[in-house]
Image: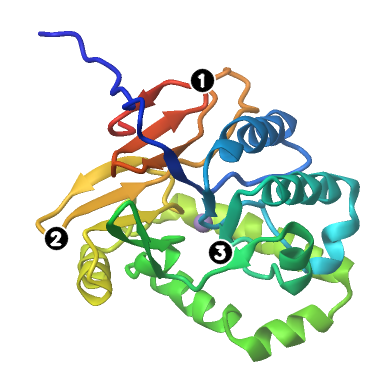
Amino acid sequence: MPLQQSPRVKAQSKLVALFASDIHLHPSLPKTTDAFFRFLDENARKADQLYLLGDLFEYWAGDEDITTNYHTKIIQALRALSDSGTQIFWIAGNRDFLIGEIFANETGAQFLPDPSVITIANNRIAIAHGDEQCTDDLPYMAFRNMVRQEKWQQDFLRLPLAQRKKIIEGLRINSQIEQKEKTSEIMDVNPKAIQELFTNSKVEIIIHGHTHRPAKHQYKEGLRYVLPDWDCDLENSKSRGGWLEIYSDGQILFRHLNGSSSDSFT
Ligand SMILES: [Mn+2]
């Protein structure tokens, strides 16, 4: 069998856009946080655009939380990136959908609806967090419908920040317990929801995260790229993470945290 070669990027082609999601930033994960800072400084600066497709934070209880030391550092790093000329686009995840105007103003990030259609290097691409396509998980979909309503969010954001954090912590523990009981199919995107996204948005490429199943899937409608989650704080040193890169000639590559690239994540 011939040795598989890492795909090469043609010299004349330019890095246009990067896509990352599910970094799950939290003060208890210092190595993951450092990897994200390196990504912003060393990689994202070379691109015209950075798309953050949800769950950048492990959770977000409201924009007042912006003033903690940990959050301030992240916001400054994002601001430095947008000031350097890289446009930052943002789609909310199921963990950080309460991020609001203050965050956008401080970082310079532009919020996009979920899903959105963008055009990069002549490719029409649908981008999404991915939770909306997990339609087999009925209890989650009901929860999502509730918390994505403006009225629910207004009421929730009226609670004191400490109380909000407590509620979210409780939800996280519950969802960890529930996830253990759900089958792996239920936790993945639904094939029909993906087909509808291809058809309704008239795209040949879908990029999303959320499922933590990094892969490149081929359909008759086109390609679906699933972004990895990040974790560099694992004891067994099996760090995971990475992002997708699109070049001006249309080439699409996965970039791993160690710098190597591949045509597919698996
Ligand atoms: Mn998610």
The amino acid type, in three-letter code, at marker 1 is: Asn
Foreground: disc 3 or disc 2? 2
Q: Which mark is residue 221?
A: 2
Mark 3 residue CB less than 8 A from any atom of ligand 1: yes
C-alpha span from label 3 to label 2: 27 Å
Where does the image place residue 162, in percent across and percent down from the top left?
88, 66
Disc 3 and disc 2 in contact, CB within 8 angstroms? no
Q: Which residue is mark 3?
A: 94
Q: Quadrant of the C terminus?
A: top left
Task: Give the left or right position of residue 67, taking residue 63 as reference.
Answer: right
Where does the image place residue 55, in percent across and percent down from the top left?
58, 55
Residue at figure coordinates x 90%, y 46% from the top left: 69
Residue at figure coordinates x 66%, y 51% from the top left: 58
Q: Which residue is mark 1?
A: 258
C-alpha span from label 1 to label 3: 28 Å
Where does the image place residue 48, in percent across and percent down from the top left?
52, 47
- Classify mark 1: helix, strand or loop: loop
Where does the image place residue 226, in percent across and percent down from the top left?
36, 47
